[in-house]
Amino acid sequence: MLLIQIQVVALLPFAGLLVQAQTQQLYDIALVKDVMVSMRDGVKLATDVYRPARNGAPVDGKFPAILMRTPYNKTERAASAGPYFAARGYVVIVQDVRGRYKSGGHWRPLTDDAHDGFDTAQWIGRQPWSDGSIGTIGTSYEGGTQHALAISNAPFLKTMVPLFAMSNYGQYGVRHNGAFELRFFNWVFSLGDPSGVPNLAAAARAASDPAAAPALADLVNHVGEYVKGLPLRSGTTPLKFAPDYEKWLIEAMSHGDNDAFWKDQGVSVVDHVADYKDIPVYHVTGWYDSWGLQVANLNYPRLRESKKSLQRLIVGPWIHSRPNISYAGQAQFTPDAAIDLNAFEQRWFDHWLKGIDNGIDREPPVHIYVMGGGDAHKTPEGRVFVGGHWRDEQEWPLARTKPTPFYLHAGGALSTEKPQDHLPVTYLFDPKNPVPTLGGNISSQGNLASAGAEDQWCTPSFWLCSDSRPLSARNDILVFQTQPLTEDIEVTGRLIVKLWASSNALDTDFTAKLIDVYPPSSDFPSGIDLNIGDSIVRARYRNSLSKAELLEPGRPYEFTIEMYPTSLVFQRGHRIRLDISSSNFPRFDLNPNTGEPLNDNRRWRVAENSVYIDPAHPSRIVLPIIPALDKQNGK
């Protein structure tokens, strides 16, 4: 048992900020490491327990528990939350999930976490220090383990704070409208280490032969080479020495249909709403989070309408799992964009687990950060000051939203006027020369790409760029933009593109990207093309994510491409821009345009893809405009 002494500063919430109140002595911490907790099938999971202590010994009595189940090494993941919450009168339990680090069994991503979480919760509730209540924390995959707990109706589970949480990943996140998000290729090739550097400990745990661990750890240094040489076939790379990982990745890349394979992996919230435990949940995500659509557009509204317990949503201007910073890529926001996560979670748990009347249950149900409004000066770090502010709302999406179609026109115009007669615009999509990913809703990408807001200009330092041109200069990107805006326009909500298009191929992809075009300034003489959202649709899944249907070459179809949601003020003088293309690599895998089975093509071809912009085929983006009157009234 380790004893940790801690001197803390109490923090109180005030007007959305956390302010210092007073210094006080709280509990010391007694840590017991590597408790091996047995699951129903006999597999034992390594578990660390942080308990409140005095004078070197755990304090007698019963306490609420806070549980984190993680694939990211429990010792590292608990470094902040474990001591923080134990010092404040909680028992903190942090566990390596099955097949990871010190836990036994085989790793099958999230598939076993429903019953493993259930068994762990049952174990916690039977401990002499447990008061019979459990709250949960954790981000990304750890957030997915929380959803698995709720879907399994785990005992003693009273409340959760799933952060940037994996869920519904047959629709978005792993498969994305039929395409595959290559960040999960990187996740597996790095053995689940989000740092992007070799991890010998993870490799040793994953290896079927200990001698192969160095080769497995080295895979992370070659991810770029492998994603350029897809498909991935069994036994052809050193990943064969981690058979659990290879098996899952190949099946995930090959299985496009959103059927039971994806829906029953344990974290598809929208497919298991009826099973989901009716408890208070605080849903946390960011506008540049890789799980933002699933959290805000799917999980929160479905659970709020179907459960009696309080559901709460906060969306910051954050990239994945970074609520503690006030920038996202090249975009700088106001200082209060960052939050103190431990203190934020403590208020929630103090109320629901300790019964403290701190008013959190009476606050508005939705708290969003509206980006924009800054003066666009260059910060000392070289970022652009986008600015923004927090705002409370009563629902999501906002009831007062005015969905407004902006149509694609000949000559690259984007406006609310309906299109005139015009021939379709045709471009060539060569999967051997893809459009490079510059920022976006991405995570676990390692060195493949950057996350968040980025100027849409290539630089030779990026491994997929061969020049310094803006992406708008590429011939395989169709650029549509408004005239400079004469007034500010707030866009808050879902971003949906209705694209009429055809191809001479049996299958292809169509991509969409929303961009805020800044005018030139002394700090940025070329202006800035700042990405706001993007998405893709694999043509064979245009009608249903559950069933693939190849194209009839030359026939126009209406494709729905939904980006992740946003909240942004496009300022006066800026332009709203929509880019249409057929690749966004390596955010998404490349379509070979041949119609062969997914992850099993032997051929590739250049596709001729056409976008229609006439009255019978009105391609458009529907923007969720917040009426100016509301802004004038301060709402």
Image: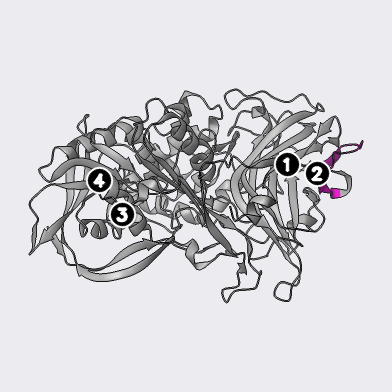
Tell me what residue is drawn at x 65 percent, y 36 percent.
537
Q: Earlier in the sequence, mark 4 or mark 2?
A: 4
Tell me what residue is drawn at x 40 percent, y 49 percent.
139
Mark 2 sits on what residue? 416
In the displayed structure image, the side of residue 435 where residue 90 appears, left or right: left
The 10 Å Cα crowd at callout 4, few under 14, some 14 to 19, many 20 or more, is many
Mark 1 sits on what residue? 404
Q: Which type of secondary structure does the marked residue at label 2 adopt?
A: loop
Callout 4–callout 1 Cβ contact below 8 Å: no
Q: In x, y percent, where is residue 427?
A: 82, 43
Report, in whole angstroms, how far the alpha carbon at label 4 lies from the one at label 3.
Answer: 10 Å
Q: Earlier in the sequence, mark 2 or mark 3?
A: 3
The amino acid sitting under disc 2 is Thr
Mark 3 sits on what residue? 346
Q: In x, y percent, where is residue 530?
A: 67, 59
Q: In x, y percent, where is residue 230?
A: 59, 42
Report, in whole angstroms, how far the alpha carbon at label 2 lies from the one at label 1.
Answer: 7 Å
The amino acid sitting under disc 3 is Gln
Q: Earlier in the sequence, mark 4 or mark 3?
A: 3
> Is 458 included in the stretch rendered in magenta?
no
Report, in whole angstroms, how far the alpha carbon at label 1 lies from the one at label 3.
Answer: 40 Å
Front position in the image: 152 or 250: 152
Mark 4 sits on what residue? 353
**What residue span does the magenta drawing correspond to?**
412-426
Q: Which type of secondary structure does the marked residue at label 4 adopt?
A: helix
Q: Which type of secondary structure does the marked residue at label 3 adopt?
A: helix
> Is 414 included in the stretch rendered in magenta?
yes
The amino acid sitting under disc 1 is Thr
